[in-house]
Image: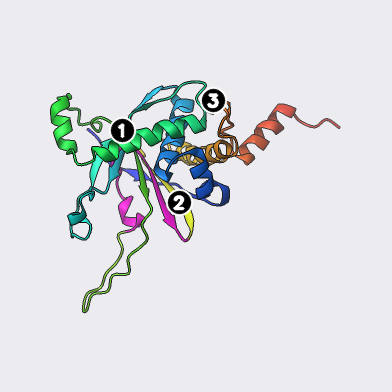
Amino acid sequence: VRTGTCAAPRRVFGGQERDGRRAAAAGGSLLAVLAALARGMAYRLAGQADLVPGTPLLGRSHPDLQRQIGYHANTVALRGSVGPEASFRSLVQCASDDVRQALAHQEYPFDGLLGELDLPRDLSRSPVFDVMLVVQTFRDVDLRLEGVAVTPFGPRNAWEWSRCDAVFHFAEEDGALVLDLNHNTDLFDPSRMRRLARQFQQLARAALAAPDRPMGALDLRPPEEAAAVACFARGADVE
């Protein structure tokens, strides 16, 4: 039976990592860029070429829904493939195509899709995908109601349980892009997931610096980890 115990290490992306001009040069939106990075990371760590993360969309494509109160979000699956020689730029282009197709079909109900696929039910995992990619770029709304106290439903409440095995949750806060890597602690060791968050940030730096290099050739090691490995390889100093 699936459990919901969780933790969510945080990494703050700044400067080069969230430069919109770099994203535009890579040929995609922020969602496409982050989806490409997530695919590259999953391929590097698991060697899995066919990947299906899920992502929520607003579900307000019709003009009449723009100012309507209510929850219209729908979940879509961003299926894509990764090859050993795929560059970051090529992954962004593929992810951009996948995002455009998802947007074109975002009104198709996810529950209806599950019914048509007729997947076997397994209470130990989520159907279709086990990993989600969430990108929130809207700013906090200053809601003032007479005689009513309003408190934002923030990460402290949002991360009290895990929705999937892992959720790469990105949001803009104070001019920076923030990653909260929500994960099920009954499946993943928290120290390993903290390292994964650091590796994701390092992969973003390396990919944006060299978008045409194969993703398999980019260094996942953060500077402090690379320095420790170099020190170990050099061996102890002998006087």
- In the rendered image, the quadrant that contains the N terminus is top left
Quarter of image, res 92:
top left
Considering every residue shown, the one lying at the far right of the view is 239
Check residue 178 in the rendering and tell me which mark sits there, or answer none. Answer: 2
Residue type at tag 2: Val
Q: Position of residue 126 (x, y in %)?
A: 25, 33
Dot 2: what SS? strand
- Total marks shown come to 3
Check disc 1: other Cα within 10 Å, few if <14, some if 14-19, many if 20+: some
What kind of element bears circle 3?
helix
Q: Which mark is residue 201?
A: none
In the depicted view, which residue is nearer to us: 223 or 146? 146
- 117 lies above or below 65: above
Residue 101 location in percent, x, y?
A: 30, 35
226 to the left or right of 188: right
Q: Position of residue 228 (x, y in %)?
A: 66, 35
Read off the residue under disc 1.
130
Q: Nearer the viewer, mark 1 or mark 3?
A: 3
166 in the magenta segment: yes
> Disc 1 to disc 3, how far (Cα)?
23 Å
Q: Is residue 226 above or below residue 117?
A: below
Looking at the rendered image, the quarter that the C terminus falls into is top right
Question: Any mark on residue 216, and which?
Answer: 3
Give the spatial CA distance, label 1 vs label 2.
Answer: 21 Å
Magenta-colored span: 154-174
Q: Residue sitting at 18 percent across and 38 percent down? A: 108
